[in-house]
Amino acid sequence: MSNRKKNQNSTAFNDYEAFAEAYVTRTNSNAYNAYYERPAMFSILPNVESKRVLDAGCAGGAYTEWLVNHNASVVAIDLSRKMVQLTQQRLGNRAQVYQADLSQPLSFLSDDSFDIVVSSLTLHYIKDWDGVLKEFHRLLSTSGLLFFSTHHPLMGFQVGKDDYFATELVEEEWTGFGNSPVRVRFYRKPLSAIASSLANTGFVIEQIIEPRPVEECKRLDPESYQKLSITPWFLIIQARAKQI
């Protein structure tokens, strides 16, 4: 999925408008998303029937669709206009879908309006986690649950420089999303920084998951299966909003 070699013909950094359709198509069936991150996240989500759920960073709507199919009432948001359009096309009127920037206050959403927040592979694009986590806490009802996945600190350290404890902007190139590699930048953080941001914003960590690929991945993509079986790539955290 990734290739760290630089290429002058690459798409502009994080230009999801340019490769949104290719991203959605590929992540529907690739090892890292379909057979690694999503199954692990789905395995720890509670019964969402009749729950109010925010899908924060919905991309093309894979999580939104799963949540709606399990009878949740879903609001989905994404920074990318194209991703919002693709999610709207996928869900029709079965979910409310908005374009919104998680690094800014979500003032159009009311306090205590959700039981669950789900955020898949989104937070690592944001430097200041305290700001977005404060918003999640505001939006959640008392004892509401937050589930999010992010790049594993070890994976980020391998892409980054020499100081594991630094919070730094790092760069990758992704291939397989068109004729040119896609250049992506994200922030890598140590585990202690992730835990501190949650504690600072009123969350208690209940569960930390270092996923393993599901068995089906072994048949469909044995190379990725082997890699993901011995090297942590993503991290999934379940946290509960405490009263502050």
Image (cartoon, rainbow, N blue to C red):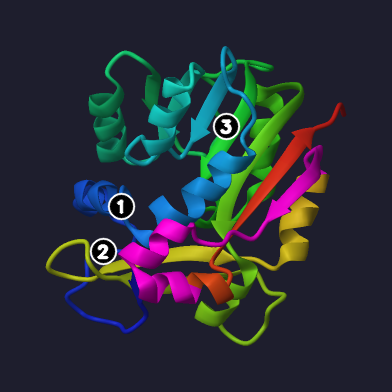
The residue nearer to you, when weighing 129 against 154, is 154
Q: Residues within 10 Å of mark 2 (few under 14, many from 20)?
A: few
In the image, residue 5 above or below residue 231: below
x and y percent of residue 238 in the render? 70, 43
Instruction: Specify the amino acid type for callout 1.
Output: Ser
Instruction: Specify the amino acid type for callout 3.
Output: Pro
Which contiguous range is marked in magenta? 200-227
Kindly identify which residue carries mark 2. Answer: 12
Of callouts 2 and 3, the N-terminal one: 2
Kindly identify which residue carries mark 3. Answer: 105
Q: Residue at x 33, y 58 (%)?
A: 30
Q: Residue at x 12, y 68 (%)?
A: 179
In the image, residue 20 above or below residue 6: above
Q: Residue furthest left?
A: 179
Mark pair 1, 3: CA separation: 33 Å
Instruction: Specify the amino acid type for callout 2.
Output: Ala
The residue nearer to you, when weighing 105 against 1, is 1
Which one is in front in this view, the residue at disc 2 or the one at disc 1? 1
- Determine if residue 103 is in view: no
**Res 29 label:** 1
Q: Residue at x 35, y 15 (%)?
A: 94
Write down the quadrant of residue 229 in the picture.
bottom right
- Determine if residue 60 is in view: yes
